Amino acid sequence: MRPVDASSLYLINGMGIETFFQYIIAGITYGTIYAIVAIGFNIIYNATGIINFAQGEFVMLGAMTAVTLNEYMPLPAAIICAVIITMAVGALIETLFIRWLKNPAVLRLTIITIGLSILIRETALHIWGAGVRSLPYFTGTAVTTISIGDVLVSPQILWVIGVSGIMVLILSFFFNYTLAGKQMRACASNSNAARLCGINAKNMVSLSFILSAGIGALAGCVVCPITYVQYDSGTSLAIKGFTVAILGGLGNSTSAIAAGMILGIMESFSIWIMPTAYKDVIAITLLLLILFVRPSGLFGNAETSRLKEF
C-alpha cells in the first residue's frame, strides 16, 4: 500500500480534511432544511400554479408555537400540537383568502400570499415579541457531539437529516400510492381534465395548503434548537426555499433535494472565504443567475416549464 503523504491531509489554504467534512455536514444540514421548504413551495405550486410566499412563515409559526406549548407539555406533544395547529392555520388561510376566488390570475394569488406572509409575521410579532426563542435539543445539549470518523456532529443534526428524510419518503409514498396523492398529481398535470374526471380541485388546493403548512411546521420544530427562531425568521427561509425550488426546477420536489444540497454546501463553504454576514448573498446571486441563464432550473425541462400556465 502506498504510504499516505501527510500533506495530502490538507486542502487549499490549510483547510484540514476534518474541517472539510465538517463543512460538508453543515452544508447537508442546511441544504436539507432548504429542500423541505422548497418542497412546500412545490406542493402548492403544483396544485394551484402559484408561489406561496408565506411558506417560510409556516416554518416560523410551527417553531414558535412549539416553543410556547413546550412550557406546558412534554416536547414530543408540543411538536405534534404545533404541527396540527399550523396545518389548521394553513387550511384557514386557504379557506378565507384563496378558495372563494373564481378563476383568479396567478399574479393576484401571488400578491395575496405576499400579503399573508406580512400579516402572519406581524401577528407573530404582536403575540411573541421580537425576542429570539428556541426549543431544547432533542438529544443531549448544545455541546453534545457524536464522532463520525474524525468529524464531530451534533445529535440534533442527525435529527434534522433523519426527520427530513422520513418526510420525503412519506411524501413520495403519498403522491405515488394513495388516491389523494394521485388526485393532486392529476390536478397538477391538468386541473380542467381532473375536474372532468370528478376530482374536486378546490379540495386538492386545500389539501396542498394543509400539507405544506404541516411540512413547514415540522421542519421548523426540528431545526429550532440549532437555528433558533423569531417572528421574522421565516422570511430568509422563504428566500432560500424559493431559490432551491427554482434551482431544482419549479414543481419538481425530487430535484429540490439535490438543489438544497447544492445551496447548503455552497453557503457552508462561503464562510471560509467571506464573512458570515455575507452568506445570504450566495442564495440571491444563485437565484438571479438561474433566472437569467436557465429559468427552468438545473434539473427542470424547458419544454415542461412552457406547458405550465405561470
Image (tube, rainbow, N blue to C red):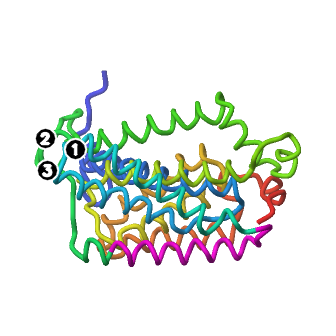
Q: Please state the extent of the stretch shown in magenta in the rendering.
A: 102-124
Q: Is 7 positioned to the left or the right of 34 in the image?
A: left
Residue 108 in magenta stretch: yes
| Mark sitting on residue 142 | 3
Label 2, secondary structure: give it. Answer: loop
| Mark sitting on residue 214 | none
- What residue did someone put label 1 on? 75
Q: Quadrant of the N terminus?
A: top left
Compared with residue 166, is residue 268 higher up or lower down, i.e. above or below?
A: below
- Percent across and percent down for residue 45 are 66, 57
Q: Amino acid at mark 1?
A: Leu
| Few, some or many residues within 10 Å of mark 2 (<14, 14–19, 20+) | few
Label 3, secondary structure: give it. Answer: loop
- What residue did someone put label 2 on? 140
Observer-nearest of 147 and 91: 91
Q: Along the polypeptide, which appears first: circle 1 or circle 2?
A: 1
Q: Amino acid at mark 3?
A: Ala
Label 2 to label 3: alpha-carbon separation: 7 Å
